[in-house]
Image: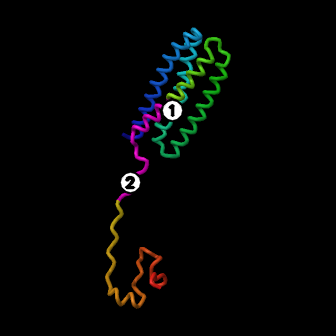
Amino acid sequence: MNLSQVLKRALVASLLVSAAVAVVGGVIGGIVAGGPGVFGAILGALLGLVFFGITTVSVLWGRRFGITGSMGLVAGGWVVKMLVFIVALIALRRAPFLDGRVFFFALVAVSLGTVLSDWMVFMRARLPIFEEPSEPEAAPAPEHTDAGDAADAGEGTSDPARPDQGPDHDIRA
């Protein structure tokens, strides 16, 4: 499974969580506050879906533009999210057609449910955190000399791959 498939699953899971919160919250909101409670639950679930969906979609689209483009889209998506959220809260703060308590609890339920569903999707995905290093290429075999004479003279004992060994760094001294 690749990251695109995982992100699409996370988006579908967020949609399902938001739909469930809208239905359950709508029923509870209807019992508690009537029509404004139903509308508050639906609007809270919808705003929660938009809030979390923007991040998932920006990461999904950002993969096409490399790491810099991806980070730019995620950061830009975050700014858009904050602006939409602030504008929505200001516009709806005294709206007579929704119950603020039901709206709040629906938004919190979508937030917690989406975080939990994202966690479950990513934990089941088993994406590799790092890539296995490739096998190192075999180094060419060193030329053989008479080791006894070279070792006694202190020459020829250096390994070019190990600069800490050689005539000046003889470990026998």
If the image is split into quadrants, where does the N terminus sit? Answer: top left
- Cα distance between the residues tagged 2 and 1: 30 Å
Disc nearest the viewer among 2 and 1: 1
Residue 129 % position (x, y): 43, 47
Query: In front here: 160 or 66?
Result: 160
The magenta stretch spans residue 115: yes
**Residue at image x 50%, y 20%?**
21
Query: How many neighbours does mark 1 have within 10 angstroms: few (below 14), some (14-19), or many (20 or more)?
Result: some
Q: Is 60 situated left or right of 1 in this image?
A: right
> Residue 16 placed where, x, y %?
44, 24
Q: In the image, which disc is placed on residue 86? A: none
| Nearer the observer, 77 or 5 | 5
Query: Is residue 13 one of those drawn in magenta?
Result: no
Residue 3 position within the rendered picture, expressed as x and y whole percent measured from the top left: 42, 40
**Quadrant in the rendering for residue 83:** top right
Q: Which residue is depicted at the point 53% across and 14% down? A: 28
- Percent coordinates x, y for residue 136 in the rendering: 36, 63
From the viewer's perspective, is 8 left or right of 68? left
Q: Report the residue marked by disc 2.
A: 132
Give the SS element for disc 2. Answer: loop
Answer few, some or many: residues within 10 Å of disc 2's Cα (few below 14, many 20 plus, some between 14 and 19).
few
The mark found on residue 115 in the picture is 1
In the image, the segment drawn in magenta is 114-134
